[in-house]
Image (cartoon, rainbow, N blue to C red):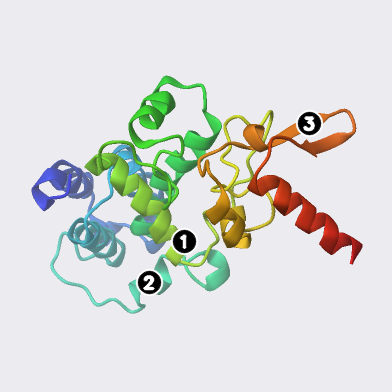
Amino acid sequence: MNKLSDWKPVIEKFKSRLSGWKMRSLSFGGRVVLIKSVLNSLPLYYFSLFRAPPSVLKILESVRRGFFWGGADSGHKIAWVKWENVINSYGNGGLNFGSLKGKNLALLGKWWWRFKTETESFWVKVISSIYGSCGGLLAESDLGHSMPSTLWRNIILAGTSIEELQVGFKHSFLKTIGDGGTTLFWDEHWIGRDKLRNLYPRLFRLEHDKKCSIKDRLQVSGEGAVTSGSGAWQKMAASRSKNSRL
């Protein structure tokens, strides 16, 4: 789905939904309703699995724009307002159409959430067995013996693209630790807003098992969490204890 030709069914559906309407007889309000109820829902299946190329998004946005301004069936019409302003939210002065690119990224980003919550699902186990326990969602994670497929790689890159929009996407997940067996001690966000490997780089270099889980380094008793084992974690615990006394 990386080529424009792969998306022709979606583009043709977009255009065919407009052919039966005479835009000259529809008010702006009617066009708004149709864009939100029909046009916006057409690519949901494709957007949920595949990352649309910029050329496809440009064509689909032009179809929406042409329909809204009444130019799809009678040639080019003057656009009185910048399209980026039209699709904005109500709070920002727009008509709340939403960006197709934003919708595509949001639907792909949902796979991140599903991977982290549906831990017992068969598809999650398959992804984990191929690309590591973190599925490649962490930049430093072990991707197994092969690079991600195009489909899964685009899902990984979608999270990076959302993060570049400065919405704090990767930090918005709060994981339930449980017994700690499914959470990486050094590589995942489970204390504060950064990984322990970044907070304690020297201790991380001393760690002999860099892919250890929380369960490997922590025991939970009736009185709370206590350290277990030996090595870098005990040094870090002692350091934190010393700093708290100071």
Name which residue type carries label 1. Answer: Glu
Q: Is residue 77 above or below residue 115?
A: below
From the viewer's side, name the closer residue of 165 and 210: 210
Q: Residues within 10 Å of mark 2 (few under 14, many from 20)?
A: few
Q: CA distance from mark 3 to mark 1?
A: 34 Å
Name which residue type carries label 2. Answer: Glu
Report the mark closest to the observer, 3 or 2. Answer: 3
Say which element carries label 2.
Answer: helix
Specify which label sits upstream in the sequence, 1 or 2.
Answer: 2
From the viewer's side, name the closer residue of 166 and 81: 166
Name the residue beneath numbered marker 2.
Answer: 84
From the viewer's side, name the closer residue of 144 and 46: 144
Say which element carries label 3.
Answer: strand
Name the residue beneath numbered marker 3.
Answer: 220
Rendering coords of residue 205 (x, y %): 53, 55
Q: CA distance from mark 1 to mark 2?
A: 21 Å
Name the residue beneath numbered marker 1.
Answer: 163
Q: Is residue 127 above or below residue 33?
A: above
Say which element carries label 1.
Answer: helix
> Does residue 43 appear anywhere in the picture?
no
Name which residue type carries label 3. Answer: Val
